[in-house]
Image: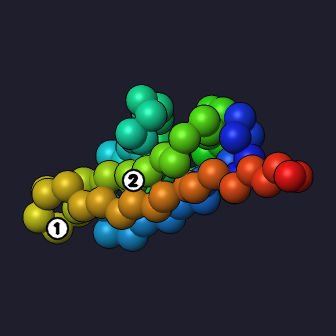
Amino acid sequence: VRKGSTTTLIWSATNIETNSCKITSNAGDSWSLAGASGVQTTSAITQETIYTLTCKDLQNDKAVSARTTVKLAPVYQEI
């Protein structure tokens, strides 16, 4: 994405406790999520950002997670 833009995270999880999911980022963002799927718009992205979805497993009560990285598009300058 371009620096300063937002992006949309689309997520879905199965076999998790209801309302146990949360998305966090290394940029300090954090959202508590309802249900087992959804869409979350991020804040403005100013650096490469890792988003982690964490939910509580329905069967063994442990946290399970998945992550994705949003990278900044390169900026080109004419010489």
Q: x, y (%) of residue 39?
A: 63, 51
| Depth check, front residue: 2 or 24 | 2
Q: For residue 16, which numbered disc appears in the image?
A: none
Residue at image point 79% right, 54% down: 76
Which label's residue is closer to the chain start, 2 or 1?
2
Q: Which residue is under mark 2? A: 53
Three-letter amino acid code of the residue under disc 1? Gln
Closer mark to the observer between disc 2 and disc 1: 2
Judged from the image, the secondary structure of the residue bearing numbered disc 2 is: strand
State whether residue 16 is above or below residue 32.
below
Q: x, y (%) of residue 65?
A: 30, 60
Q: x, y (%) of residue 70?
A: 56, 55
Asked if the residues shown at circle 2 and circle 1 are in contact, with their CB atoms under 8 angstroms apart, the answer is no
Q: x, y (%) of residue 59?
A: 17, 67
| Depth check, front residue: 70 or 51 | 70
Three-letter amino acid code of the residue under disc 2? Leu
Identify the image quadrant of residue 73.
bottom right
Q: Which residue is under mark 1? A: 59
Residue at image point 71% right, 35% down: 4
Tag 2: Cα neighbours inside 10 Å, few (<14), some, or many (≥20)?
Answer: many
Residue at image point 38% right, 52% down: 52
Tag 1: Cα neighbours inside 10 Å, few (<14), some, or many (≥20)?
Answer: few
In the picture, measured across the screen, residue 9 lies left or right of residue 15, that is right
Residue at the far right: name it. 78
Q: Disc 2 to disc 1, how far (Cα)?
A: 18 Å
